[in-house]
Image (spheres, grey):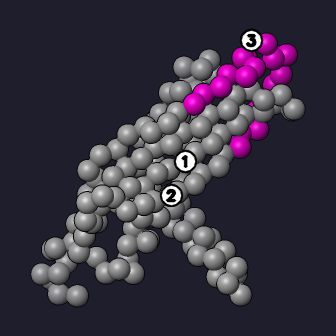
Amino acid sequence: MSEAQKKEQTLGIIAQYTKDLSFENINPISQIESSNEQPNIDVKLNINHEKGKQEDVYIVSLKINISAKVKDTTLFILELSYVGEFVIKGFEQSMIEPILYVECPRLLFPFARSIIASAVNEGGFPPLYLAPVNFVDLYQQQLNAKNQTKQ
């Protein structure tokens, strides 16, 4: 690829926003018997994308579902859909999918992580700071799953 072609490549965020946020405080800490047991936190992360209305615009959404339980008691459930609108142009077509599943979520995740920590804290629990996510590994797992399904 020539130097001129590299300069024409663009990956930029047009907008990012919380599309949907739900926090259900099912069992406040004050109603749980004192227990030194750490809650079991179950985190599910999905990445979806669609083509925007304008050329070279893509909409990427991180959907994060979290439930926290102690023994069989659910403490809270959080659902977040955090969306970014990206302009992606000048890349080979084969690079678009990895950008949508790796780079775009990587750019959105710190903001979603902050929203989650704040929502959990405002819900009466200590803030929940999600560990960083390796989106390259997630993308590779998705590709491997697709390849196994085809076989």
In the image, residue 93 above or below residue 53: below
Element under label 2? strand
Q: Earlier in the sequence, mark 2 or mark 3?
A: 3
Q: Amino acid at mark 3?
A: Ser
Would you say residue 87 is visible in this rendering? no
Quarter of the picture holding the C terminus: bottom right
| Residue corresponding to mark 3 | 30
Q: How far apart are the two marked residues, 2 and 3, measured between alpha carbons?
A: 37 Å
Q: How many residues crowd around disc 1 within 10 Å: few (fewer than 14), some, or many (20 or more)?
A: some
Q: Position of residue 17 (x, y in %)?
A: 38, 40
Q: Amino acid at mark 1?
A: Lys
Disc 2 to disc 3: CB gap under 8 Å:
no
Is residue 38 left or right of 114 when viewed as pictured? right
Write down the quadrant of residue 90 in the picture: bottom left
Q: How far apart are the two marked residues, 1 and 3, measured between alpha carbons?
A: 29 Å
In the image, residue 145 above or below residue 13: below
Q: Residue at x 59, y 51 (%)?
A: 45
In the image, residue 22 above or below residue 134: above
Disc 1 to disc 2: CB gap under 8 Å:
yes
Q: Residue at x 33, y 52 (%)?
A: 85
Q: Residue at x 52, y 33 (%)?
A: 21
Q: How many residues crowd around disc 3 within 10 Å: few (fewer than 14), some, or many (20 or more)?
A: few
| Residue corresponding to mark 1 | 63
Which residues fall within the magenta stretch?
22-42
Nearest the eye: 131 or 2:
2
Q: How many marks?
A: 3
On residue 48, the disc is 2
Q: Amino acid at mark 2?
A: Asn
Q: Earlier in the sequence, mark 1 or mark 2?
A: 2
